Structures are given as C-alpha cells and as structure tokens.
Amino acid sequence: MKVKIVINNGIRTIRLNRPDKRNALDAEMLDALITALPKNPDQSERLAVLRAEGTVFCAGLDLTTRREISAAGESSIEAALHAIEAYPLPVVAVVQGPAIAGGCELALHCDLVVATADAHFAMPNVQIGLSPTWHLTRKFLELAGPAMTRQILMLGDAVPAARLHALGLITDAVSPDQLESAAAAIIERLAANAPLSLRAIKALINRGMAFRDEINHASIDALVLKAVHSNDASEGRTARAEKRRPLFAGA
C-alpha cells in the first residue's frame, strides 16, 4: 500500500509509503491522498498528520509516470493539495528529509509543518523546463511573499528547513533526534483544543483567502502549458534522468 491511513484517538495519520522511490507521487498515490482527507470527517476526529516512510519526505511527482498523471489531468496534484486545504481540521506535516516540488507543496499546504533542521524544501521546476501552476504558486505568495517566492521558484534551489522556520514559513525546525517529540507536542496541543473552534478557525482562514480563486489566470495557465509541452521540458526531464545539465533552447 503506497499510502497508509490510520485513525487512532481522533488523529488521522496519513503516511506516504513508497520509500524505495523516495515517496515520489504517482497517480495512485495522488488519488489515495484525495480519498484520505474527506471533507466531512467523523466528529470524533481532531486533526490529521501527514508523514512519510524512509529518509525522504517526498521527491515530488514521479517523472516516469508524469505522462499518466497529465493524461488524467494536471490538476491531480492540485486536487490533492486542495484536499489538504479543504479538510476541516488542522493538518500537520512531519518532514524528516527532502520535500521536493510536489512534496514541497504537500508540506506547505498543511496548516503546521515540523521538520528536521537538515531537511530541505525545493521547487526545481524551472531547472527541468517546467513551471508551477497558478494554484501552486499562490501558496508561496501567501506564505513567503513576492521576494522569497521569486528566489524559490526562479532559482529552483533547495532551501534548508531552518531558514524557512526563521522566515516563518514552517512551524518548527529541530534536530533529527527531536523530531518525534516536537511533532508529538504540537499534535497533543491541537488534539486538546476545542474541535469546533479548530473547525471554525480553519474555515475563517480559508474564507479569508477565498478571493484568490476569483483572480483571472487563464493567460497564465496558457504560459504554464506552453512550458510544460515545450521541447525544453522534454530535454529537462531527459537531462535530469541522465544526471547531466540540460541544454535549453527556449522552445
């Protein structure tokens, strides 16, 4: 099972379980994530926790199945991210290693993020000829503001968790041996809070950001698709698989 779901004492734990592939997301995993976060969880639930097996939180979309995911709709990853946001209770990400591209988005779409200080977050799309979509980019604008968003997306380089914590983008960055205790402390505090209040607060925050969905972004979507279907994107993916520097031609 590539995604495990366990509900215990009001805590819904969702665990990525593909460590041999660095928890890279294929279509099956994206569908499982969407199902794992229902819009109407049982009233006994208090929060959800997103974790991963192995030493890598998530390496993003599985490039070997990217065509499959695109055929099902590029919005598959967006639907999974929306499920995190739409889940009416807090979602806590526990990040023990690299969170890359779609993995980075998974973590940052959670309400609270606890990571090891040596973990890193990256959106390397630009390095392989791709572009994040409007819905993915807006999350960075909300969390990081324009300046940091430019640095993360235009350079595509990894940013240490410790720096993201210093900038207020994630909740905590701790030493690897403190990760479980730090995560447990936050989970226990959330579980002890009033569940109706938690639901109301999450709804307040989501409603406060609802204006973003009304912004016309059709022309931006066209630019993103032009990049996704370009020769550069094909070259970028091939170069990444062959572990060499891509030769981009701007077409």
Image (spheres, rainbow, N blue to C red):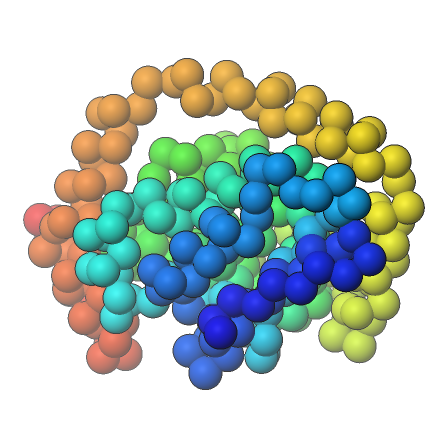
Q: Is residue 72 visible?
A: yes
Q: Residue 5: x and y, percent?
A: 61, 63
Vertical side of 144 occupied by 1: above or below: below
Left or right: where does residue 110 sit relative to residue 80? right
Q: Is residue 148 visible?
A: no
At a point 57% along the width and 44% down the height, the residue shown is 38
Vertical side of 199 occupied by 150: above or below: below
Left or right: where does residue 110 sit relative to residue 195? left
Tag count:
0
At a point 64% along the width and 51% down the height, the residue shown is 164
At a point 52% along the width and 67% down the height, the residue shown is 3
Vertical side of 129 occupied by 84: above or below: above
Q: Quadrant of residue 87?
A: top right
Left or right: where does residue 111 sit relative to residue 189? left
Is 147 in front, or is 212? 212
Q: Residue 185: x and y, percent?
A: 87, 58
Residue at the far bottom: name it: 20
Is 68 in front, or is 212? 68
Vertical side of 213 occupied by 9: above or below: below
Q: Residue 203: x and y, percent?
A: 67, 26
At a point 58% along the width and 79% down the height, the residue shown is 54
Q: Residue 163: x and y, percent?
A: 66, 55
Left or right: where does residue 86 sit relative to residue 61? right
Is 249 in front, or is 64? 64
